[in-house]
Image (spheres, coloured by chain):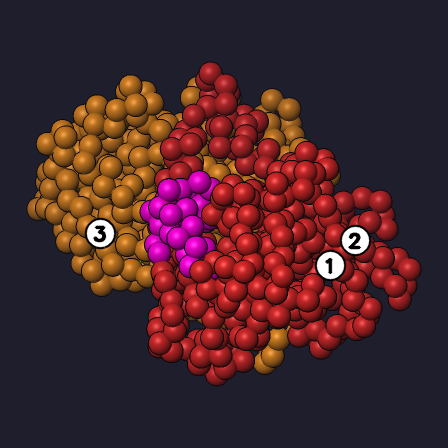
Chain colours: A orange, B red
Amino acid sequence: MSIANPTVEQRFAFKAPLPLKSGSSLPEYELVYETYGELNADKSNAILICHALSGDHHVAGIDADGKKGWWDGYIGSGKVIDTDKFFVVCSNNLGGCRGSTGPTTINPQTGKVYGADFPIVTCKDWVESQNELRKYLGIEQWAALVGGSMGGMQVMQWAIDYPEKLRHAIVIAAAPKLSAQNIAFNEVARRAIMSDPEFHDGRFLDQETVPKSGLALARMLGHLTYLSDDMMGTKFGRELREDKLKYNFDVEFQVESYLRYQGEKFATKMNFDANTYLLMTKALDYFDPAADYDHDLSKTLAQATAKFLVVSFTSDWRFSPQRSHEIVKALLDNDADVSYAEITSAHGHDAFLLPNDHYEGVFGNYMQRVYDDIPTAEASV
Amino acid sequence: MSIANPTVEQRFAFKAPLPLKSGSSLPEYELVYETYGELNADKSNAILICHALSGDHHVAGIDADGKKGWWDGYIGSGKVIDTDKFFVVCSNNLGGCRGSTGPTTINPQTGKVYGADFPIVTCKDWVESQNELRKYLGIEQWAALVGGSMGGMQVMQWAIDYPEKLRHAIVIAAAPKLSAQNIAFNEVARRAIMSDPEFHDGRFLDQETVPKSGLALARMLGHLTYLSDDMMGTKFGRELREDKLKYNFDVEFQVESYLRYQGEKFATKMNFDANTYLLMTKALDYFDPAADYDHDLSKTLAQATAKFLVVSFTSDWRFSPQRSHEIVKALLDNDADVSYAEITSAHGHDAFLLPNDHYEGVFGNYMQRVYDDIPTAEASV
């Protein structure tokens, strides 16, 4: 059994200040993480999974609350990322709300929760903190870094900032930076949260409340952008919630009911922190590694030495295949070793989390290549 | 001069009850409207313009406040809809907030503003009320009905419900019904308004307040869906509002500033009524004329006898060209006289309001045909 049942939450504490891209710094921090599979003798079979906006460190297996990991379909014994072969690590990002230092953590300098005082974090900062975790785990080089959406952005940042620390970079449903439309959707979501009177300028926990309705709105909107028009049409069409039209402002159509449920669940049952949501959307907005290299993506990715697998999905309109093409082209400008697959899927941005034979085939084959590239693979099993 | 300067607001009062599609009814109503150009002797050169979600009756010319009509670029002396040739009428829809009976009107049965008590209205109800205006103006048959977006839906409804009352139907950037995604966007906008504590269950005027922040959010989101990703990229890219990144929750990018401004303007300076916004989005959701004809659009449009011009825009993702194709195909199933143009434009859904040579050419040529079709055109000039 390569995944403990239930999964075990581990903690890494870094007791020195972490300077941040913003110019601010964190006096100290902790990362919560999970691992699956066995680290081999020379620590060469480790894979780091980077999570997306609302994700966390519980990526595979079943936790103590009975909750399945968010990518459990792809990570486990005999799965695409095979925990019989690899040692898989996933940590909750700084600024998160699932255990790593973030807005719901006590600020050691004030003795109160950070709340709105938590500094803006960026992809670069996440990579810095994950690199400290790497050192702590004694891993010299990741066999691969893997991430979808915002996770894919962290993988790119790793490949640029610490090229020698990874052999393979797997970048799924991502983009080299957000478009104006992407930023605009994030801004509407943030406005929804910040204009909720229960937000209290981000100090809502001090007031023993949470901006539920703003957070639910933000999630509804986010969810909308993760799904394709076609898929929503197939899934819901114009199906009514009840037999006939009521001609009032209650829910009439199934799609309304579904979205309201998603928003509610996120804000209440899942208890996601509103400040974390704000921070994650800002980190997305700020992600633009080429800004440090004359806004030239080819020059930027010239830093990378890892081999790449880039994957996009046909119906993804949040980060469309065109955005992956930009990454692939910039890698090819550098004669990098890059594989690219454009997967036919009706599931929009969400496709990266869902079962899909072609996707699983491409991804699984590539993971075999990652395994074959482990310097002492024979010795390590 | 075919358009009075300033334009003159006229009123039509209907003193009998109007039964509504919902089963409810309005005890009486008024429509505010403007007209431009001269009605010819046999009243055969009249054109009705139907407005979209946030539009009103002031479609051309300059009003007493110095405000230009929302489609002034296309309507006037020598313009696409030539007021030297046509008598152009545009009324504010029932449920509107610009003068026609709506949520901000006094309910004669209670002596208070309708507010949330204003009944749900549909495209069919609008057509009924516009048809009463037609009778009042003594017009037997419109030379053409013209509308973009929600306006185009009213034109379709007219062609189905009163086929003999129009010779031409011009349907621009519309759809035969909303998709699940369209409804979902409307629902998020409605949630934004209804979850604003200043909404007070729609009785905000009684409380001497307005749900500004909810309405601003709804408008930001709406605006986002009117623009194309490409156009936003060209117009804003990732341009910063100030010289350098500030790493805080103030506006960083121009696109954020632009959207906030649009939301603010709509909710304050333009003083748009929140209940009207809710009603208009519901009317859009409910629009589905084929529901009355076994959900068969071809059978539905078999009712129509008008000649059609259908226009779509390549970058419109709110009502994409595919949605216009559905309309055109259903018309062709009936061997209807239909012209169709797919206009190349980067401006998304908004393109129907903006200058575009190809669009103006197609539209203008078609209007000449409408003019040539006036039974007594020679006598009327």
Query: Residue A186 at x, y = what percent?
Result: 49, 40
The label nearer to you, 1 versus 2, is 1
- Residue for point 82% across, 68% down: B15
Report the Cα–Cα distance between label 3 and label 1: 54 Å
Q: Does the magenta segment cover residue A365? A: no
Describe the element under mark 1 as helix, strand or loop.
Answer: strand
Q: Which residues are magenta?
A: B341-370
Query: Residue A376 at x, y = what percent?
Result: 10, 40
Looking at the picture, tell me which residue is in the foreground, A26 or A260: A260
Q: Main secondary structure of the magenta part?
A: helix
Q: Is residue A219 left or right of residue A214?
A: left
- Residue for point 12% across, 37% down: A337
Estimate how packed mark 1 is, as few (under 14), some (14 to 19) or many (20 or more) residues with alpha carbons within 10 Å. Answer: many
Describe the element under mark 3 as helix, strand or loop.
Answer: strand
Extreme residue in the right direction: B111
Instruction: For mark 2, name the chain.
Output: B
Q: Is residue B49 visible?
A: no
